[in-house]
């Protein structure tokens, strides 16, 4: 049995796939397997994977038709033999000590999952994605571990709600598989892990390099942006089932409004219009006074929604143009 299973979903990653695989193979920690899930990638990824698998027996290739990263990740979990699981997207890469530090962290603190910080790799620069704020976060704890019961609801908004730079116990996450056939599958998965973990540990070192694209190859089919509304509903039900909706009601609304607006701004063509209409349908009759207005009024997204709700699409397009120009 290996200690760590590294699951690599692969789709249109031929330009950077060798960098990704090299960063895993050359880790300071070597007790791992690499499960590469080829999600029907139409480029040269499968040939690159075969070349690497021929030279390193720890690499195993699984192929599926293009059904999305949720299915790919679930397949990887199903075949994983490791005690711990790490996900690395085929365009991203790891620090040389990532597996060693992450494995040591989750083992030492006996946590259900652990996270470290992330570098964002832009075409011409690298920046630290400091979520949560390191100074604010570390001052809150006398130990490098916690669970959600120790945090107020607003702290949920401070986390990166995806699988990047996290390590999980397989026995813990096998109960929380990814929602298939939808984009943004990481959001409900993170909610399940966050709410159900007895212990979450962290390492302030940045160990994961997240490659940023102007247009993500994963969501190039722009209609996928509409999935965010279904994902929001699924995530709300997770909080409700866990009995945590009252605590997180306002923070969850803020998170979902942010996700909605971000994806409307990223969508193009007729899908942008459909998303705008769906946003109006979802939020225009919402009674914001039933939420914690003290929290809402600290959030820019609340004022953005006050400005665009119940306005027409042309008004929204002018609003979006202004926001983008102000960046």
Image (spheres, rainbow, N blue to C red):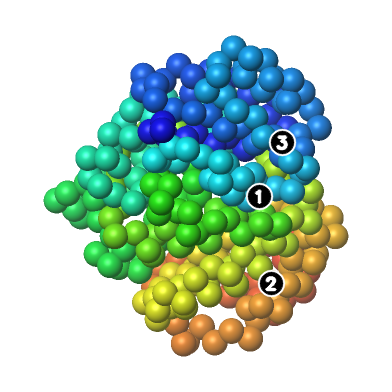
Q: Is residue 67 above or below residue 299?
A: above
- For the point 49% across and 71% down, the residue is 238
> Could you give the CA–CA distance between mark 1 and mark 2, rounded to whole angstroms?
27 Å
Specify the farthest residue to the right: 270
Q: Nearer the viewer, residue 313 or 201?
A: 201
Relative image position of residue 254 (x, y in whole percent): 49, 68
Image coords of residue 83 (percent x, y): 39, 40
Q: Distance between the Cα atoms at labels 3 and 1?
A: 11 Å
Label pair 3/1, CB-CB below 8 angstroms: no
Spatial CA span between label 2 and label 3? 36 Å
The answer to whether residue 261 is left or right of residue 104 is right
Residue 110: image x %, image y %? 25, 47
- Between 17 and 319, the one nearer to me in the picture: 17
Q: Closest to the observer: 284 or 297?
A: 284
The answer to which of marks 2 and 3 sits earlier in the sequence is: 3
Residue found at x 52% / y 73%: 236
Q: Which mark is residue 143?
A: none
**Residue at position x 34%, y 45% in the image:** 114
Residue that carries the numbered disc 1 in the rendered image? 71
Camera sees residue 107:
yes
Q: Secondary structure at mark 3?
A: strand
The residue that label 2 is drawn on is: 279
**Is residue 159 at all visible to an observer of this figure?**
no
Which picture quadrant has residue 267? bottom right
- Total tally of numbered discs in the picture: 3
Q: Residues within 10 Å of mark 2 (few under 14, many from 20)?
A: some
In the picture of the structure, the residue carrying the numbered disc 3 is 63
């Amino acid at each position: 049995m290996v200690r760590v299973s590294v699951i690599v979903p692969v789709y249109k990653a031929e330009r950077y796939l060798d960098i990704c695989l090299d960063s895993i193979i050359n880790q300071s920690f070597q007790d791992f397997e690499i499960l590469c899930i080829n999600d029907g990638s139409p480029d040269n990824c499968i040939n690159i994977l075969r070349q690497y698998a021929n030279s390193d027996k720890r690499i195993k290739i699984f192929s599926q038709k293009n059904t999305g990263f949720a299915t790919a990740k679930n397949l990887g979990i199903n075949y994983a033999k490791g005690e711990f699981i790490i996900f690395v997207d085929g365009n991203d890469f790891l620090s040389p000590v990532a597996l060693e530090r992450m494995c040591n962290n989750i083992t030492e603190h006996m946590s259900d999952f652990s996270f470290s910080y992330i570098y964002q790799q832009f075409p011409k620069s690298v920046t630290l994605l400091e979520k949560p704020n390191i100074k604010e976060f570390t001052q809150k704890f006398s130990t490098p571990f916690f669970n959600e019961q120790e945090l107020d609801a607003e702290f949920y908004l401070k986390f990166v709600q995806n699988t990047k730079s996290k390590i999980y116990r397989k026995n813990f996450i096998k109960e929380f598989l990814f929602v298939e056939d939808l984009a943004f599958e990481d959001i409900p998965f993170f909610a399940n892990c966050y709410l159900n973990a007895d212990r979450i540990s962290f390492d302030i070192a940045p160990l994961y390099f997240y490659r940023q694209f102007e247009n993500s190859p994963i969501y190039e089919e722009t209609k996928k942006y509409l999935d965010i509304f279904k994902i929001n509903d699924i995530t709300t039900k997770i909080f409700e089932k866990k009995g945590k909706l009252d605590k997180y009601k306002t923070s969850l609304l803020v998170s979902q409004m942010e996700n909605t607006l971000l994806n409307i701004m990223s969508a193009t063509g007729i899908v942008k219009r459909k998303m705008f209409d769906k946003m109006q349908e979802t939020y225009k009759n919402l009674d914001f006074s039933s939420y914690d207005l003290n929290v809402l009024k600290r959030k820019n997204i609340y004022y953005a929604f006050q400005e665009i709700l119940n306005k027409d699409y042309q008004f929204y397009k002018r609003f979006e143009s202004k926001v983008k120009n102000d960046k």
